[in-house]
């Protein structure tokens, strides 16, 4: 969390999850008359488990999360978070019996719905980075210079974008067939890996079959080759 203080100084707003054992403090109220010794920097310690157990302050909020409208039980309060070095807004989301999530936002004026939706929007960004690393192989290029690394990463980004553009107007039935994976969710939307595999199969089909004739023997070869494509891509 060492990045928080420089980012906040730049004027950026940070929204992120908090650990359930995050160290939070109440805002310190300065006494009218200063006492002897070093003045206190922090107020009373706030434990998230105690916040959740308390029945006060909970309210319901509507937010558009992961493509649909949802209602969440939440509690909002302000606390001092040491890694941020300032007061932050803390949002506690009740997810069920003995289950909660804690979120933090450096914008004290942010609404509960705004914080929830910002965290949900991060998922798509994180999924893109995951696809870039695991499927496109970003960061695995063995090149020597800084310029070559930058160029290789740009190629990965372009490849990812071009695959998504190619698959944009295609139906889920075209992009994936999970009949060979009965344990998988048939209604799950096509992943980036599904789109890449479909594009590879399409390129191979056009490469090998576009100029071939329609004889019986050739059709038998085609069928066997399609079976091979399913195994390879």
Image (cartoon, rainbow, N blue to C red):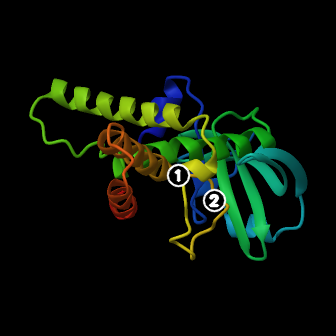
Give the camera-side residue of 1 and 62. 62
Is 26 situated left or right of 164 in this image? right
Q: Which residue is mark 2?
A: 188
Numbered-mark total: 2
Coordinates of residue 11 in the picture (x, y in percent): 55, 23
Q: Which residue is mark 1?
A: 191
The answer to whether the residues at label 2 and label 1 have Cβ atoms under 8 Å apart is yes
Gap between marks 2 and 1 measured at Cα: 8 Å
Residue at the extreme front: 215
* Residue that appears at 76% across and 32% down: 109
Which quadrant would residue 217 be assigned to in this image? Answer: bottom left
The reply to whether residue 36 is visible in this rendering is no
Relative to 155, residue 59 above or below: below
Is 39 situated left or right of 221 in this image? right
Q: Quadrant for the C terminus, please.
A: bottom left
Give the camera-side residue of 27 and 65. 65
Say which element carries label 1.
Answer: loop
Give the camera-side residue of 123 and 49. 123
Say which element carries label 2.
Answer: loop
Relative to 40, residue 152 above or below: above
Coordinates of residue 125 in the picture (x, y in percent): 53, 41
Relative to 186, residue 3 above or below: above
């Amino acid at each position: 969390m060492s990045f928080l203080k420089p980012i906040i100084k730049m004027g950026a707003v940070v929204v992120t999850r908090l650990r359930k054992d995050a160290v939070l403090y109440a805002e310190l109220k300065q006494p009218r008359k200063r006492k002897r010794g070093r003045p206190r920097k922090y107020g009373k310690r706030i434990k998230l488990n105690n916040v959740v157990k308390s029945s006060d302050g909970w309210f319901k909020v509507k937010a558009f999360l992961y493509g649909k409208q949802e209602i969440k039980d939440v509690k909002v309060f302000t606390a001092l978070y040491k890694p941020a070095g300032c007061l932050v807004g803390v949002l506690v989301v009740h997810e069920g019996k003995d289950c909660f999530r804690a979120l933090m936002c450096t914008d004290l004026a942010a609404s509960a719905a705004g914080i929830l939706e910002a965290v949900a929007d991060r998922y798509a960004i994180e999924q893109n980075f995951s696809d870039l690393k695991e499927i496109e192989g970003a960061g695995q290029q063995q090149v020597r210079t800084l310029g070559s690394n930058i160029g290789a990463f740009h190629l990965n980004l372009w490849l990812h974008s071009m695959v998504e553009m190619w698959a944009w107007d295609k139906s889920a039935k075209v992009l994936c067939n999970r009949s060979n994976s009965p344990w998988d969710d048939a209604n799950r939307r096509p992943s980036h890996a599904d789109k890449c595999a479909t594009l590879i199969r399409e390129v191979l089909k056009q490469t090998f079959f576009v100029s071939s004739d329609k004889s019986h023997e050739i059709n038998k070869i085609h069928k066997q080759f399609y079976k091979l494509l399913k195994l390879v891509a």
